[in-house]
Image: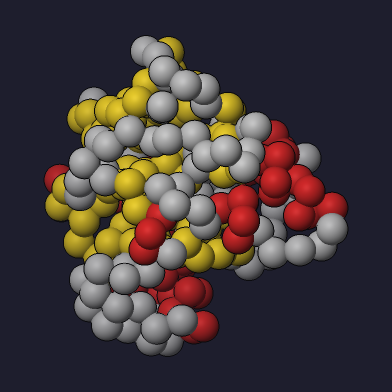
Amino acid sequence: MKIICVGLNYHDHIEELGFSAPDEPIFFMKPETALLVRNRPFFLPDFSQEIHYEVELLVRINKLGKHIQPKFAHTYYDEIGLGVDFTARDIQERLRKEGLPWELAKSFDSSAAVSPFIPKDQFPDLSEICFSLQKNGETVQIGNSNNMIFNIDQLISYISRYITLKIGDIIFTGTPVGVGPVSINDRLTGYIEDQKMFDFKIK
């Protein structure tokens, strides 16, 4: 099982970071050991002083695929979830300045919080999915799939040009504006529309 994460896929988040919009999707990988499920707490690692949350819509691949055409991409997933891509921002900034890969900042244990998945046919329009994140009861991120630079089908098609997708692979589709730090005793609660998807503490 692979965790494939898309970066810089919302214009407002790109502006937040001071970057330019990419011409093609940007993605990186997290190992299976990054999974954090069933509302288990997230323990702050000792190697970073600035862990940030990034809430994202997820899709789970349901069949083997390689070189998937965009018009067929919708047949390769039938569930939508919500997740948090935890990022060691201080380490990421250092690695960027040194021109090095991001794995240390993105791929550490428990850095991919994943909710249960719900059937995509519950949504009348996959290009209009609203999602949000609360920290300690205050909404800190609000996103909508209509603001993606590259939509879900485009992402699946693009990724499959380079990496064979297998059953159970999870794609994080990018985060909207509002990323920020977490501290011990914070509580993160995520929603798709009005449905609570996860609720866990930072320790």
Foreground of the two, 86 or 76: 86
How many marks the image carries: the answer is 0
Question: Picture quarter containing residue 61?
Answer: bottom left
Identify the residue at image location x=27%, y=37%.
40
Question: Picture quarter containing residue 138?
Answer: top left
Colour scheme of this structure image? secondary structure
Identify the residue at image location x=51%, y=53%.
108
Identify the residue at image location x=38%, y=69%.
2
Please state the horizontal and vertical placement of residue 150, each as a whole percent of the image: 52, 58
Please state the horizontal and vertical placement of residue 27, each as a whole percent of the image: 56, 64
Q: Which residue is the extreme one toward the right?
A: 98
Identify the residue at image location x=35%, y=78%.
165
**Quadrant of the snapshot with the C terminus:** top left
Q: Which residue is the extreme one toward the front?
A: 46
Q: Where is 148 relative to 102, above or below?
A: above
Q: On the rendered structure, is 16 left or right of 94?
A: left
Q: Where is 175 relative to 70, above or below?
A: above
Foreground of the two, 136 or 34: 34
Q: Is residue 162 visible?
A: yes
Please state the horizontal and vertical placement of residue 32, each as a whole percent of the image: 36, 63
**Quadrant of the snapshot with the N terminus:** bottom left
Foreground of the two, 114 or 24: 114
